């Protein structure tokens, strides 16, 4: 391989777009980290770690999803040493909102939690709350959520 071809390959591998092809959620017991394999064009990567928002004394777990679009970063250009970064919407998995202000999290079961910073309040678009009755949980519609101490808010 010529030096130009090798350099071209390394540059091409610095940043790649791909989709999650396989997910291994790891094992706390065996101290095996969570990891994914990514399909990017013809390349199927080896097992890659994924970063968390926090990974110190405060930790955050938000596993990757099969089919999720990601960036594969290889600072050296070597795909054996890359990581996967999530957060790219696609035609397969589109954005879950179209307004400027809310922070919205949509879960696989359809539940939605939202905080609207313009209105300065949390909002639960499903407008349902759970209350306990005996040993079962039931849903009851009680309108928009009002935080304690702010019961008069509209």
Image: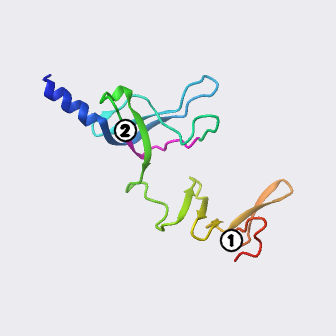
Q: Residue at x 62, y 28 (%)?
A: 28
What segment is highlighted magenta in the picture? 61-72
Instruction: Answer left or right for 82 relative to 43.
Output: right
- What is the x, y in percent for residue 19? 38, 43
Q: Is 141 located above or below residue 82 in the figure?
A: below
> Which of the pair 148/90 is nearer the observer?
148
Distance from Cα at disc 1 to Cα at disc 2: 40 Å
Label 2 packing within 10 angstroms: few (<14), some (14-19), many (20+): many
Q: Nearer the viewer, residue 82 or 141?
A: 82
Residue at x 61% of width, y 67% of height: 125
Tell me if residue 98 comes above or below residue 36 in the rendering.
below
**Mark 1 or 2, nearer chain start:** 2
Q: Which type of secondary structure does the marked residue at label 1 adopt?
A: loop
Residue, far right: 134
| Residue 131 lies in the magenta-colored region | no
Left or right, 17 with respect to 26, comes to left
Q: Does 2 sit left or right of 38 as displayed?
A: left
Q: Position of residue 81 (x, y in %)?
A: 38, 27
Q: Nearer the viewer, residue 46 or 104?
A: 104
Which residue is at 70% across, 73% downward? Answer: 143
Q: Which residue is mark 2?
A: 72
Q: Residue at x 46, y 67 (%)?
A: 98
Q: Which part of the image, by quadrant, shows the C terminus?
A: bottom right
Q: Residue 133 falls in which quadrant of the image? A: bottom right
Residue on which the image places disc 1: 144
Mark 1 Cα-neighbour bin, 10 Å: few <14, some 14–19, many ≥20: some
In the image, residue 69 lies in the stretch drawn in magenta = yes
Q: How is the image coloured?
A: rainbow
């Amino acid at each position: 391989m010529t030096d130009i071809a090798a350099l071209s390959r390394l540059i091409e591998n610095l940043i790649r777009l791909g989709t999650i092809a396989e997910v291994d959620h790891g094992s706390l017991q065996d101290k095996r980290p969570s990891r994914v394999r990514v399909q990017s064009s013809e390349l199927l990567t080896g097992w890659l770690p994924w970063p968390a928002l926090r990974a110190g004394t405060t930790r955050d777990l938000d596993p990757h999803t099969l089919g999720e679009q990601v960036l594969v970063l290889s600072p050296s250009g070597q795909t054996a040493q890359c990581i996967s970064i999530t957060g790219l919407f696609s035609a397969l998995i589109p954005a879950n909102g179209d307004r400027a202000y809310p922070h919205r999290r949509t879960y696989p079961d359809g539940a939605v939690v939202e905080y609207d910073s313009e209105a300065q309040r949390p909002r639960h678009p499903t407008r349902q709350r759970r209350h306990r009755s005996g040993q079962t949980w039931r849903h009851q519609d009680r309108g928009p959520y009002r935080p304690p101490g702010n019961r008069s808010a509209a």
